[in-house]
Amino acid sequence: EENMTVTEDFSRVENTYQMEAEVCIVFSDFGKMQNVCNLLIEKLGTSVTISPPHFYHTPEAVDTLRRQVCVAAVGNTRRKAQEVCRLFGQSLGKPLLIREEETKEWGGHIDSHLSSSPDSLTLQERIQNATAYASCRVFAVFEIKGKENRRNKLL
């Protein structure tokens, strides 16, 4: 599978040969990761050692997060403008200008950059440290239509 690499190492120990295999799997679903870990422990017992997961964000995932946050900010701005228009008996028209003013990102710390040892943290703490957040501030100008314009269009 494309998300899995296997490295095997054979060595001679006295009169026997020993094989060690390292399997690295990339998961995007914590539930699947936990199920695979449990299955390996169940089938292989103490002969298997499972290292704590290493969390990272692909550039594509970070880019998707940025886009989603910007689209959500524009949607929030439009809804607020609609509420203000309703308050004054007007209707909101098409957007005349939308500009992304500022995007901030925080969190998403890679394990090796943490001050404390990753092994000393619980899985939940490691997930929390690795979670990426983003915010976006937008500036938008919308056309405002008067009540009479809306009535004429309905007739």
Image (cartoon, rainbow, N blue to C red):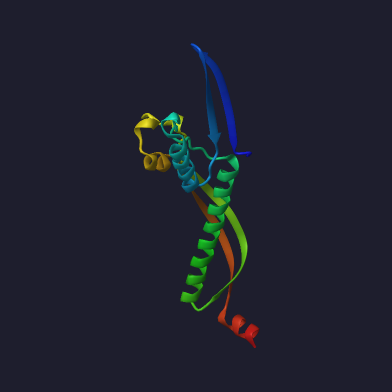
**Outermost residue toward the front?**
15
- Using the image as rendered, state which of residue 55 and residue 155 is in the foreground: 55
Q: Left or right: 49 with respect to 59?
A: left
81 versus 15 height, above or below: below
Query: Horizontal and vertical percent for residue 123?
Result: 39, 40
82 versus 126 height, above or below: below
Query: Horizontal and vertical percent for residue 125?
Result: 37, 40
Residue in view at x 60 percent, y 85 percent = 151
> Where, by quadrant of the figure, is residue 128 drawn?
top left
Residue in view at x 59 percent, y 40 percent = 59
Query: Horizontal and vertical percent for residue 16?
Result: 51, 16
The quadrant of the image that shows the N terminus is top right
- Residue 106 in sight in this render: no
> Where, by quadrant of the figure, is residue 114 drawn?
top left
5 versus 30 height, above or below: above
The quadrant of the image that shows the C terminus is bottom right
